[in-house]
Amino acid sequence: KKDIIILGIESSCDDTSAAIIRNGVLLSNIIASQKVHEAYGGVVPELASRAHQQNIVPVVDQAIKQAGISRDEISAVAYTRGPGLLGSLLVGSSFAKGFSLAAGVPMIEINHLQGHVLAHFIQEEGVEFREPRFPHLNLLVSGGNSQIIIVRDHLEMEVIGQTIDDAAGEAFDKCAKVMGMPYPGGPLIDKLAKEGNPNAFEFSKPRIKDLDYSFSGLKTSFLYFLRDQIKENENFIEENQADLCASLQKTIIDILMDKLVKAAKQTGIKEITVGGGVSANSGLQNALKAEAEKRKWNLFIPKFAFTMDNAAMIAITGYYKFKKGQFAAQDAVPFARMSI
Ligand code: KG4
């Protein structure tokens, strides 16, 4: 039986990534993160697409070399069609089209969000593989999304709850910005929160129906709270940084966990996976583990490299689509907005 070798391409936001997966096993996963955005306090779309343009060829080259395969062995090229920044997506999709034509292999379009969900199916040589069963629930929390998804099969998913405004990662990043921290603030809040008291301050939680989320109110109440405190003491943020981070982080985690627990109860599903950049948060991971212990969940937390945007998750999704013969047309265009 012939090997199925997938080249994955990810360029939806500010990471240019290429990966090679052979029969479901990861051979390489190269990620070039873009530093240019730090100075601007957020991702600048125009700069992101230029950096992708610069990085894409060397990143793919390195992925193929590191995998120890030759270009001719690749069975198909899988690329992120959306959602994401259009200018960034265009670089990856144009590259995939060029590669597909030059190598004479089919192209597979991937929904970035499905990629995050399927990150749990990436096998690595020498690493014990624990595979989530179906159906399972996935909490997808990143800079652009906060969703609860029922995963019925590799390619059969349904969103049962989602944010009606900001994503959880945005709540971290925007509140960090208010405190004068660099972008992205999520990892920094995580670090500082470890030294602080999570019950020092209380911030309001949204009352949103069903399994949906909302984070824009928290950001606003955080901003107003700080404004009032600074009027009394201009050094308030500096003097209370760790407590502010710990309390804010606890609020975000409480909001996320509340709906996840509700979803697990409603569906009766105890197989739980998590993904997206925010799933790297140590406080969230602890809360998930505690809840898993209490409720007998079978919990899957991805390794750090697979929480962030990466091409390995695009390649593994491509592998499952390849097996089903789901290929993209040469005239497919990327979409900034795309749901699961
Ligand atoms: O999935 P991801 O890499 O890409 C986007 O969707 O943009 O997620 C990035 C997001 C950012 O908002 C970042 O602040 C957040 O994930 N993030 C974290 C942590 N690490 C990354 N948030 C909280 N704690 C962390 N340790």
Image (cartoon, grey):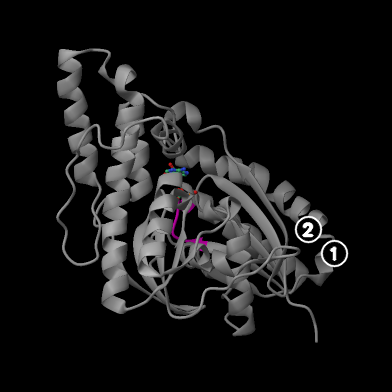
* Contact check, label 2 and label 1, Cβ < 8 Å: yes
Q: Position of residue 243 (x, y in %)?
A: 31, 29
Residue 64, disc? 2
Instruction: Kindly tell me whether residue 339 is visible in this rendering.
Output: yes
Mark 2 surroundings: few (<14), some (14-19) or many (≥20) residues within 10 A: many
Badge 2 element? helix
Say which amino acid is labelled 1: Ser
- Residue 84 lies within the magenta run: yes
Q: Give me the residue at 48% from left, 66% from top.
A: 117
Q: Position of residue 8 (x, y in %)?
A: 65, 63
Q: Position of residue 339 (x, y in %)?
A: 38, 67
Residue 295, disc? none
Instruction: Please name whichever residue, 309 or 211, is drawn nearer the observer in this view of the structure.
Output: 211
Picture quarter containing residue 149? bottom left
Give above or below for 2 relative to 49. Answer: below
Q: Position of residue 114 (x, y in %)?
A: 48, 68
The residues colored magenta run 81-86
Q: Which residue is mark 1?
A: 70
Tell me how far mark 2 sits from mark 1, CA to CA: 7 Å
Instruction: Please name whichever residue, 265 or 315, is drawn nearer the observer in this view of the structure.
Output: 265
Say which amino acid is labelled 2: Ile
Q: Give me the residue at 45% from left, 54% from top.
A: 84
Instruction: Please name whichever residue, 87 or 190, is drawn nearer the observer in this view of the structure.
Output: 190
Picture quarter containing residue 208? bottom left
Badge 1 element? loop
User: How many callouts does the rendering have?
Assistant: 2
